[in-house]
Amino acid sequence: MSDTFSPYGNNEVSNVKSRIRIPHLQQMKVRGQKWAMLTAYDMYTATIFEEAGIPVLLVGDSASNNVYGYESTLPVTVDELIPLVRAVTRSTRRPLVIADLPFGSYQASAEQCFHTAVRFMKEGGAHAVKIEGDVEMLPQVEKLTRSGIPVMAHIGFTPQAEHQLGGYRVQGRGDNAQRLIESARAFETAGAFALLIEMVPAEVAARITAAVSIPTVGIGAGNGCDAQVLVWQDMAGLRTGPLPRFVKQYADMRGVLLGAARDFTGDVQAGDFPGTEHSF
Ligand code: KIV
């Protein structure tokens, strides 16, 4: 690991040439240095987020809704996700790229999980994978870790289990808080390099963050996590309709694209495009 590594601040981030690796994330936790993670599914967003200094990119199964137009994360397949992972890893040099294993591709057994993860590493070039679930996923985490595949465990609300959980509901309330903290510790012991904590009371996520020595990445889990993640289309305002409470929109990408597309069609209809400067 380079001594000059500086994930944030003074724009030094743009001078860091080497790939972000798991020990860097560990160092940031020790230093109390917070970091941001975004989803990315294609070359342009991946390179923009790399330039912005985002150290970790997630090729999420949220591509199901946000790229492929499915209703939930459940339908997307391994074969649909691998090309997106490949696009992100091929077009970036610095961020750690995590591939989400889709529903049905890892729950059956540790062996199934291993074979799916290997495809994402070999064919997609992923540097790590993420799986959702509770303690029933510990054998999967142990198998991947023993096989040299870094794994992030996604706990709390796990969208792939939305039907089992009765919809999008905050997890870890009341008596369930202690159980969630124990699950988090068990994932650390099993070898997970990080935890993604979704839709959990802020106070519970902060207790988990204090209870484990691996980084926690929150989404709808308050400000006490080591890192925060958002789906990029939510963060940048491409998505329409009601937003989850945990989303903050930092731009109006939909408005910008809509305006550009309307201007373009208007110019074409008026015969103003292409002009002589665009013609040979
Ligand atoms: O697939 C995804 O986008 C996720 C989010 C919780 C970040 O897992």
Image: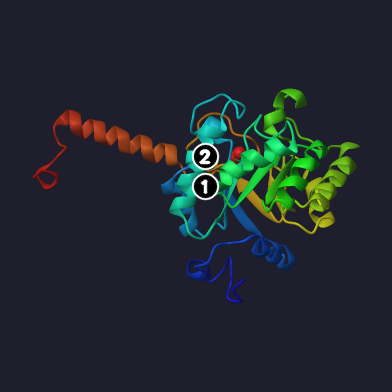
Q: Position of residue 134 (x, y in %)?
A: 79, 38
Quarter of the displayed picture in which ligand 1 can be seen: top right
Secondary structure beneath label 1: loop
**Nearest the eye: 39 or 250:** 39
Q: Which mark is residue 217?
A: none
Q: Is residue 11 above or below residue 127?
A: below
Q: CA distance from mark 2 to mark 1?
A: 28 Å
Q: Residue at x 43, y 37 (%)?
A: 254
Q: Which residue is mark 2?
A: 82
Mark 2 surroundings within 10 Å by alpha-carbon count, few (fewer than 14), some (14 through 19), many (20 or more): many
Image quarter in which the N terminus is found: bottom right
- Three-letter residue code for mark 2: Ile
Q: Is mark 1 within 8 Å of ligand 1?
A: no
Q: Which residue is mark 1?
A: 250
Res 256 visible: yes
Q: Is residue 278 left or right of residue 91?
A: left
**Nearest the eye: 97 or 217:** 97
Res 174 visible: no
Q: Residue at x 65, y 31 (%)?
A: 103
Instruction: Say whether disc 2 or disc 1 marks the residue closer to the N-terminus.
Output: 2
Q: Is residue 103 above or below residue 279?
A: above
Q: Residue at x 72, y 54 (%)?
A: 193
Secondary structure beneath label 2: helix
Q: Position of residue 54 (x, y in %)?
A: 54, 56
Image quarter in which the C terminus is found: top left
Q: Position of residue 153 (x, y in %)?
A: 72, 45
**Nearest the eye: 123 or 70:** 123
